[in-house]
């Protein structure tokens, strides 16, 4: 990846006590919250594949455009680098997910049957950008969503669609490291909203095994490119 791209997607960390005092929300967790159907896997996509994806996609993000949408059925209609990503994800997640969840995301369709149409969306989040909490369109997308954070990490927040005010504990924040893979199904797909808070820096838990006495680290966010893969609901 060239230096310009590295600068675009850079991020840095610091842990100063002065910075910590500015943060009211709790630190974003590095481990997955207990939401049924939410899986933050320990696998990550290879760095060379992430670099290839960024180089292929950056030309689409001219001016202030922040989204690229691509459609295809099976291996038809999607560019080769997207098919390579989907194939890589299938292999990486084979041992990370239950057989039923893996089959949901990567169905084995007989040759004489029509493969479900797939939509992939790439969203570019520059520092300070975000997206309001939402549930992806129920009438358009089926169960099972894959999200990959390319190059820079980012915080994603989760909140119940129908929250009991007496039991509300506020949104749950999850740190998605660079090249990490997140899967949403079941309740995580249908009963929880997810969004990206519009920040230029975030407060993230210390890495496990690090004992500095600090509550977390201030992370200066670079631009993040999120991949989201869906199956379209048949009409």
Image (cartoon, rainbow, N blue to C red):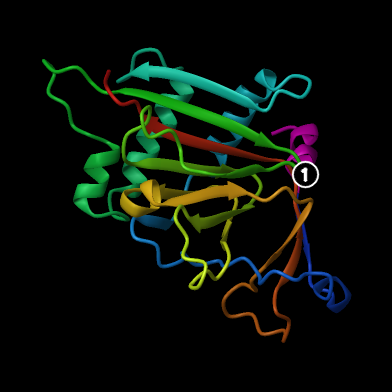
Task: Give left or right: position of 125 versus 181.
Answer: right
Which of these two is toward me, 48 or 151? 151
**Prevailing secondary structure of the magenta residues:** helix
Question: Is-magenta flag for residue 49?
Answer: no
Q: Position of residue 180 (x, y in %)?
A: 51, 51
Vertical relation: 214 (above or below) 84: below
Residue occupying the far top of the picture: 77
Magenta stretch in the rendered image: 1-10
Q: Nearer the viewer, residue 197 or 57?
A: 197
Left or right, residue 224 beside residue 104: right
Classify residue 29 by image quadrant: bottom right
Q: In this view, does 172 lie above or below 206?
A: above
Q: Where is residue 14 in the image (x, y as percent from the top left)?
A: 80, 67
Among the 4 quarters of the image, the one containing residue 207: bottom right
- State the residue at coordinates (78%, 69%): 23
Q: Nearer the viewer, residue 45 or 30?
A: 30
Q: Is residue 216 above or below residue 117?
A: below
Q: Which residue is identified by label 1?
A: 127
- Name the element at disc 1: loop
| Residue 234 percent location from the top left of the image | 27, 21
Q: In this view, does 152 lie to the left or right of 72?
A: right
Q: Which residue is drawn at 69% across and 19% down?
A: 59
Q: Position of residue 232 (x, y in %)?
A: 34, 25
């Amino acid at each position: 990846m060239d230096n310009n791209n590295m600068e675009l997607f850079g991020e840095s960390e610091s842990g100063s006590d002065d910075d910590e005092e500015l943060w009211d929300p709790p630190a974003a967790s590095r481990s997955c919250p207990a939401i049924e159907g939410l899986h933050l896997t320990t696998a990550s996509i290879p760095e060379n594949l992430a670099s290839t994806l960024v180089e292929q996609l950056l030309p689409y993000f001219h001016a202030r455009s922040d989204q690229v949408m691509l459609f295809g059925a099976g291996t038809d209609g999607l560019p080769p680098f997207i098919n390579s990503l989907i194939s890589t994800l299938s292999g990486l997640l084979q041992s990370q997910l239950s057989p039923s969840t893996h089959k949901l995301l990567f169905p084995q369709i007989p040759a004489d049957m029509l493969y479900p149409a797939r939509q992939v969306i790439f969203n570019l989040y520059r520092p300070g950008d975000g997206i309001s909490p939402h549930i992806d369109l129920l009438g358009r997308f089926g169960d099972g969503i894959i999200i990959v954070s390319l190059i820079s990490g980012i915080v994603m927040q989760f909140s119940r669609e129908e929250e009991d005010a007496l039991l509300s504990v506020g949104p749950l924040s999850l740190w998605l490291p660079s090249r990490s893979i997140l899967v949403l199904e079941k309740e995580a797909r249908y009963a929880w909203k997810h969004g990206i808070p519009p920040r230029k820096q975030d407060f993230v838990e210390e890495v496990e095994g690090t004992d500095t006495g600090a509550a977390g680290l201030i992370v200066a966010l670079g631009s993040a490119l999120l991949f989201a893969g869906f199956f379209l609901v048949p009409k």
